[in-house]
Every structure is written in C-alpha cells, then in structure tokens.
Image: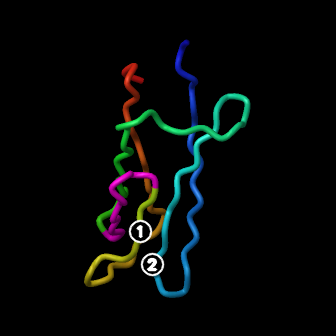
Amino acid sequence: MPEKVVKATIDLPLPDSGTGTATLNFVDAAGLAATLPAGTVPVWTASDPAMVLTPAASGLTSTFGPATPPVLATAIVITATTTLPNGT
C-alpha cells in the first residue's frame, strides 16, 4: 500500500510570558488526522537566532522563546522538516 502524502499545520500561540509551544498536527489529502511513520522525527529551525527552539524528543512539539539576551527581531519563520522513509 503506498504511503499517504501528508501536510503539516502549526499552532503557534505566544503567551505574554514571551515563551510558547508550537505543535505539529498532520492531516492526509482528505483532511483526516494522520501520523508520521515510526522513527520519523521532524527537525525544527528558526530563520533568526533571536528565536530559540527546544524541540521535544518526538519532534512533534517545540518550545520557543527569545534568545538570551533578548534581541529585537521581526518576521521570524519557524520551520519543521522531516524525511519520510520513501525519501520524500
């Protein structure tokens, strides 16, 4: 059976404390909930070192917050990527 193509959406609330948690939720092409294959762990990156990411071991969530000392930054892009067993 061929693997389903999935896409990820991210929920990125930033509380007044200045730190938050990003969570990946996967859905298949039909919009139904999906999961990553076992052993597939997303890798998180931020487009600016002003944002510090601390991913969970599973890679499905990451805490984020300002660097120490804080640096003014805008329009930071947080990315989570992974390679599926089929190489995609």
Report the span colored magenta: 50-60
Is the residue marked by circle 2 packed among few (<14), some (14-19), or many (20+) residues within 10 Å?
A: some
Residue where numbered disc 2 is placed: 19
Quarter holding the C terminus is top left
Q: Please, is residue 30 above or below residue 58 in the view?
A: above
Q: Quadrant of residue 57?
A: bottom left
Please name whichever residue, 10 or 68, is drawn nearer the observer in this view of the structure. Answer: 10
CB contact under 8 Å: marks 1 and 2 = yes
SS class, disc 2: loop
N-term-proximal mark, 1 vs 2: 2
Residue where numbered disc 1 is placed: 63
At label 2, the amino acid type is Thr
Residue 44 horizontal/vertical position (percent): 36, 52
Q: Looking at the image, which residue is at 58% across and 49% down?
A: 25
Q: Looking at the image, which residue is at 36% across and 43% down?
A: 41
Please tell me whether residue 66 belongs to the stretch shown in magenta. no
Please tell me whether residue 55 belongs to the stretch shown in magenta. yes
Q: Looking at the image, which residue is at 33% across and 68% down?
A: 52
Cα separation between marks 1 and 2: 7 Å
